[in-house]
Amino acid sequence: MTCGKPIDFEALVAWWLGEAPAGDAIEEHLLACAHCSGRLEWLAALSHGVRAVVREGRVSMVVSAPFVESMRRAGLRLREYRLDPGGSVDCTIRADDDAVVSRLRAPLAGVRRLDVVRAQDAGPEERIADVPFDAAAGEVLLVPSAAWLKTMPAFTTRTRLVAVDEAGETQVGEYTFVHSPG
């Protein structure tokens, strides 16, 4: 079961997400090609697994605003915090919350690559490289693992947004989260 002209993975994902025109050549190819149909089945299973771990709050992630809206439409109960650079917030998660969304505002015009650097209390820094962000909206959306947050005692996390380019790094915002157990 091979294919002489397999559908490009990005095109297959776009079709699965409904970002490709309906009734186009991809759909026709999928109906006629067992190899590419199998890849689509794999993608559907992966998507189901990702949805399950997100719904269960078992992953931390940087997401887009449309993703947060899809969480809301799916009926997830969201607790949101909005911070400007230099801001601090007392935060928590309650037993009936499905997720926490941290909206970090920052001046992102002209930024090509953005890293999130965070440290809990006096612990080591953790860097998440090249995160998605909306420069026009001027925000980065963080969703920490709800399952993890619900087990945590009081702690403080400092999060920095760092623009990275050929010339080096520039901090565009620093935010402090003071967590209290729910």
Image: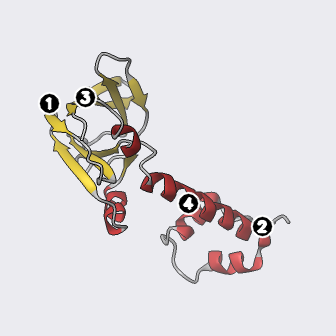
Residue at horizontal 85 percent and vertical 66 percent from the top = 1
Which of labels 3 and 4 is toward the front? 3
Q: Residue furthest right?
A: 1
Residue at horizontal 15 percent and vertical 39 percent from the top = 84
Callout 2 crowding tier (Cα within 10 Å): few <14, some 14–19, many ≥20: some
Labelled pair 4, 1 in contact (Cβ < 8 Å): no
Q: Which amino acid does the dot numbered 1 rest on?
A: Gly
Mark 3 or 2 closer to N-term? 2
Please state the horizontal and vertical placement of residue 172, each as a whole percent of the image: 23, 32
Q: Which residue is mark 2?
A: 35
Q: Which residue is mark 1?
A: 86
Q: Which residue is mark 4?
A: 47
Labelled pair 3, 4 in contact (Cβ < 8 Å): no
Label 4: element kind: helix
Give whichever of 90, 61 is nearer the camera: 90
Labelled pair 1, 2 in contact (Cβ < 8 Å): no
Residue at horizontal 59 percent and vertical 80 percent from the top = 24
Q: Which quarter of the picture shows residue 164?
A: top left
Give whichever of 87, 1 is nearer the camera: 87
Label 3: element kind: loop
Quadrant of the image containing the C terminus: top left
Which of labels 4 and 1 is toward the front? 4
Please state the horizontal and vertical placement of residue 152, each as a whole percent of the image: 33, 33
Against 91, is 43 above or below? Answer: below
Left/right of residue 54 with respect to residue 93 in the rendered view: right
Q: Which amino acid does the dot numbered 2 rest on?
A: His
Q: Which residue is mark 3?
A: 154
